[in-house]
Image (cartoon, helix red, strand yellow):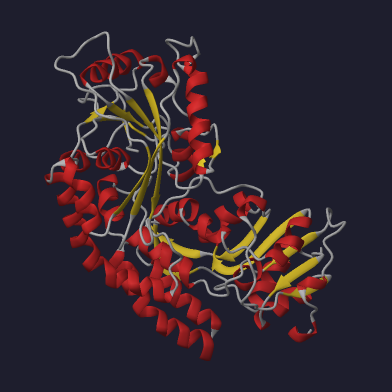
Amino acid sequence: MAFSTFPSVSKCSSIGREKDTVVADMDGTLLIGRSSFPYFALVAFEAGGILRLLFFVLASPIAALLYYFISESAGIQVLIFAAMAGMKVSSIESVARAVLPKFYADDVHPETWRVFSSCGKRCVLTANPRVMVEPFLKEFLGADVVLGTEIRTFKGRATGLVSRPGILVGNKKAEALLNTFGDERPNVGLGDRQTDAPFMALCKEGYIVPPKSDVKSVSTDKLPKPIIFHDGRLVQKPTPLIALLTILWIPVGFPLACLRIAAGSLLPMQMVYYAFWALGVRVIIKGNPTPKLTKSNPDPNTSGVLFICSHRTLLDPIFLSAALGRPIPAVTYSVSRLSEIISPIKTVRLSRDRATDAAMIKKLLQEGDLAICPEGTTCREPFLLRFSALFAELTDELVPVAMVNRMSMFHGTTARGWKGMDPFYFFMNPSPAYEVTFLNKLPKELTCGSGNKSSHDVANYIQRVIASTLSYECTGFTRKDKYRALAGNDGVVVEKAHVAKANKVMGC
């Protein structure tokens, strides 16, 4: 059947298809974007670093020439080789699980999703490597079957070549469909280009997804599962232009980041706010900062102010200190040794033993003010994780602080990479911003001591107050949920036998 004879997907009914089977192409069909370049670029950078991204960008013109003038499959083969050759398969799988879903979810085609989501059995047939796309398609779009190109491996590493039958384009898509479904013809086939016609002809109904520049993607809250946790360093989808600008910026951005970090570490805290502004780091202060508590000697009967901060990056207490104009010590579950060395404020590690941590926090509060992030880990999306209730039992001097940051190129957090680079990536952004909003001090009648409230009630109340201020959503997720989703573990590193038995926790 000629491709032009297929009707538009807008004419496909989505009513009463609960028992139907749908088969959809991915790029340009299930996704609005017709190019897979950005997603291969993400694999290249997140699993291979900046030099691999440079190699990939240099190879992409060759891939484009082959794709458009010689063979679609040859162009895709070049992209696969440039992005994956020599990489650990586990690294590719990690990127596919933790990084790519966020970018895929932001590009889902509304008309295709209307039909795809209405069918009882969903299959995706794509030329992309299955290892790249399967986690997103199954976990976030509810696909039952994913048929994609299979990459060759050797001793746990990708060779850059593909297994038989090769790149799934044209007739090879039709063959893969026949091998999977046999004589049972799928009800609906969705595609966007001429090479999709062979598999669409095998379906009872076939529909074209025409390319349109003004299509608005499906809101992520309408997908079966929201994107709450995601990883990776790049903020924007790396189109060819964005990828090139990223490569060109890093040699400039890294020295700039070092200068900004040096200014924050070496200058008196009263000057850090102005130094940051002079170096392009915007610090926006809202609300009424709490005045400094003056104490000549630690008094066990009095307490400093405990600042309860929402957690966006490990730099939260530093920007809190810059906003107050004085260093505020912070308790952390763990930061990298490098981050501790360059930190301009005192950081104290929690042991995760409740009695030990409570005694330590009380002692620090006797000495002055203190900052804590009770979520225990960072979250990039507009959600707040569950607040640990321990802090509410230790003092009635509680000040909620809503933290928001803005980055244009790089995320300043990671669950998979080395956390020592977190501050460098944040400060490598051309003009990063932090917004620090001081909320009203918690009334005594709402605290544990004076108000006889339970610690969980106090923690949940503060979580709701901060979420309301930021227009965020409260969740019951914890750091274990985050690390299980992004890194496949609980976020705990097992110590060697000769080291102390206490668990060491993987950063923020």
Where is residue 30 shown, x and y percent of the image?
Answer: 65, 66
Where is residue 46 shown, x and y percent of the image?
Answer: 37, 59
Q: Quadrant of residue 15?
A: bottom right
Q: Residue at x 38, y 17 (%)?
A: 396
Where is residue 378 shown, x and y percent of the image?
Answer: 40, 41
Q: Residue at x 52, y 34 (%)?
A: 477
Q: Residue at x 84, y 57 (%)?
A: 17
Q: Nearer the viewer, residue 98 or 185?
A: 98
Q: Nearer the viewer, residue 428 or 99?
A: 428
Query: Vertical placement of 57 versus 425: above or below?
Result: below
Query: Vertical placement of 453 versus 312: above or below?
Result: above
Whether residue 231 is visible, yes or no, is yes
Q: Quadrant of the C terminus?
A: top left
Q: Quadrant of residue 4?
A: bottom right
Q: Nearer the viewer, residue 446 or 494?
A: 446
Q: Quadrant of the N terminus?
A: bottom right
Q: Residue at x 87, y 56 (%)?
A: 16
Whether residue 385 is visible, yes or no, is no
In this rendering, would 443 be left or right of 224? left
Q: Quadrant of residue 89?
A: bottom left
In this rendering, would 182 be left or right of 503? right
Where is residue 441 shown, x and y percent of the image?
Answer: 41, 26
Query: Vertical placement of 277 versus 127: above or below?
Result: above
